[in-house]
Image: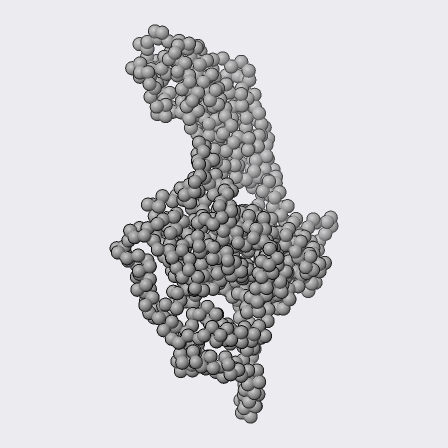
Amino acid sequence: MTQPKARKRTERYPDPLAMVATICIALTYSHAKAETVPSQPSAILQKYCVECHNATTTEGEIDLSSKHIDWTAPKNRDLWERVLNANAQQIMPPADAAQPTKAERESLTKWLDGKLLQHTSIGGTLPRRLNRSEYQATIRKLFDLPKFELPVGFPGDIELHGFTNIGEGLVVSPPLMEAYSKVAWEIAEELYPPKNPAPKSSVRIAKPDDMVLSFSAATVRDGTLRLASRANDVMRSCSWPSRIELNYSGTYRVSVSASKFLSDRGESFDDPMILEVYARPVAASERSRVQNFRLLKEIEVSSEEPETAVFDANLYEGETVLFRWKNAEMTHDPPAIRDGFEKIARANKEFLAAWLKVVYPNGNAKPISLAPLRGRVGWDSVSKHMNDPELDLTGVSADSESAEAFFKLVTKSGKTSIADSLCHYYFEYGPSLEIHSLQIEGPLKLVDSPKDLLRKRRQEKITGPRKEGMSDEAFARQMLETSLPRAFRRPVDSADLDRYLAVAKEHWDSGHSFDEGMHLLIRNILISPRFLYRSLGEGKLDDHDLATRLSYFLTGGPPDTVLVDLANRKRMSPDWVLKRESNRLMPGRASDFFVKDFTGQWLDMDLLPEIMPDPKLRFTPQYVDMARSEVEYFFATMLRENRPMTDFIDPDFTYTSLLFAKHVYQLPIKLTKDSTANRKLRRIKLERGQRAGGLLGQSAIMMATANGVDTQPVLRGVWVLENILGTPPPEPPNNIPALTPDTQGATTPRELLAAHTKDAECAACHKRIDPFGFALENFDPVGRWRTRWPKANKPIDASVVLPDGSTVQGAIELKQWAVANIDQFSQCVAEKLMTYATGRLPNHAEKAEISKIVKENRESEKGFRDLVLSLIASDTFRTH
């Protein structure tokens, strides 16, 4: 952010007496705020901590030797909260040092907890700008641009405390400000593009050689373009000019010269041929359906001599014209293809004999592959035999067994192969429709395209309708009255309106157009801190800030009209209103933004695209997608159905495919005969108390806590501590060497870690980390169950002693332990949710409030949805 300008300093020497007085007052005030550490906690600290953490020996840069503590200083509260956690989790003192008794630990915990609660206030989110996804969603909603995407290279957000929406990490850098300016310009250009001078009318001509020949939809014969068939898709039946793309939306005069093509060897066509002329976006795919385009004209072609049809039609920027023969006899539907072959075969023995000779060479009973006979290549082979005077017609009949076998083959494979060859029969012998030339003149006048009309609707959304006789200034003010409150997510006063309007007026006065002034206003709005930041206040959230926090929390975007109306009427804050609106906005689908974004960050699902499973694991990209979908559908169901918190650990359901359940989870699943059905994600029942299911048994979790090739108990252990139990270990000291992997596989991971943790400095943390990782070692890097360490080829020993002294034998018993200690998991999830919602790590007072909510939720037998609603109703959520 731009730093405030420094005030001019008065050049004078300071008064020495005043300086002394100031220092004395400051020291007196500081001493008055500092409290003496009571004798009992002081004795415990002196006995177990101060030897290593004093003024001269500050291990970990921590000094606990002071007899006085200023609890009002945030850095002191942070320090002593770290001490509280280290004591409660028994991380300190180190394993090789004397340990406090249980009573001493409890005494120290009670004193620190009380002091921290006494001196910690709820709140403290730093100014919090919109992160990437919120910024994009806000622009989409504000300007009705549902497909708007941030440009490539737009700066990413810093991840802090596991999330990318934390106020402390949402800094504003020069590259980001430049990116904001570029996006603001892009949005302004979308709404108020520069007006080009009126174009001059011109004539564009396309000859047959200028037309697109897609597959066998058309061909050029004897200097004309011939169409022979009709289909619903463009690539099989249509043609269009390759070099005509209109740059302006307007009315154009289209002239088409066309005729019938018939021959003595072909069939007759007495009715007029109907030539359809469509408007085709140049960017449209050749696989598009014809029905997706605008029909401009139907032209009746009745003569074998060229006739010119002329008509006026509206064509839009980026379009050209497309031709299709509406009533062609030949179609590309399999039954019709057979009928076409059979009809010609009954009238033309040479045609049938030639095809039988090509498809069944040397009289073979088994046909050759039809694929090489596709299009012109196939027709050239058949035509060669048709025109051979020595072609044997003996026994050739459309009623023969060989002919019937051929017709069945055509029905089965004709559309994808020899139908294109049949087109060339019609090209050569008719009937086909000929196009001799195309001329497009214009624009005769300019018209609004659908894109122009959409732009005007978007303009009106931000300006409101312009009343008759309204001046530019009044209209611009109306725009500001409409858009500023929506952009800033709260009402604005007349002074704000005047300031912005003055910017536009100055622009107009310097010779710029009205639209250019509006362009400038939009850019100014989009780079305003009041747009880029959610709120800049302190203390309790007012109604507008509460609506904003709720909306971005549950939807990832700005408040909707219902929330805005409630906030404007100061009706957002009552508990019952907040609960009602929370329920209304509560996500319930796996595709909802909150579900994807929160699980992506909390459970590290966003890491999955970066992980490439070892090919030996036979885990396809489709399996990776299925694994992530399982987590998202599972989480959405927990929220939607308000299921108990224990179901996060040991549920009786999951979401996956039958194939995944059988091949990855090794469940006793019976596959169906329908391979598509086997791959479809569905809800699957599970038995409780099994290894599959829940966050400690899902494939995606095991992938996110591995590297795709092998597993690392430390990585999984740290992940469980941080994301399941909410007690992340401290960063390892800089002087501790990294764990050296055994590339030869001579030792097991357990043996490697045993050697690594002989150092007392390592042992304290690894005593907490490793058990959770080893308990999950039966899951391989993609979550498939195994019983042996693959490199060492030794049985996996998943038995562990947890930090609280509990003994568990692997993943199933770990899940049982987690269910028995569900409040610890619930506290972790609740703190993660609150961090994500408020943009700050909960402080000691806020954790205490969350703890009460978690306890009440369990004691009242409430579910996950209830927990989220209670968090939203809390003081922590309602405070800056």
**Residue 448 image point, x, y percent:** 61, 40
**Residue that sits furthest to the top in the current view:** 394
Whether residue 598 can be seen here: yes
**Residue 171 image point, x, y percent:** 50, 64
Q: Residue at x 35, y 55 (%)?
A: 797
Location of residue 738 (image quadrant): bottom left
Q: Residue at x 43, y 80 (%)?
A: 47
**Residue 679 image point, x, y percent:** 45, 38
Q: Residue at x 32, y 10 (%)?
A: 391
**Residue that sits furthest to the bottom in the current view:** 17
Is 605 left or right of 313, judged from the image as shown? left
Whether residue 191 can be seen here: no
Q: Is residue 600 above or below residue 239?
A: below
Along the viewing direction, whichever of 313 and 82 lies nearer the viewer: 82
Q: How many marks?
A: 0
Along the viewing direction, whichever of 664 and 59 lies nearer the viewer: 664
Location of residue 6 (image quadrant): bottom right
**Residue 215 image point, x, y percent:** 42, 28
Q: Residue at x 44, y 14 (%)?
A: 342
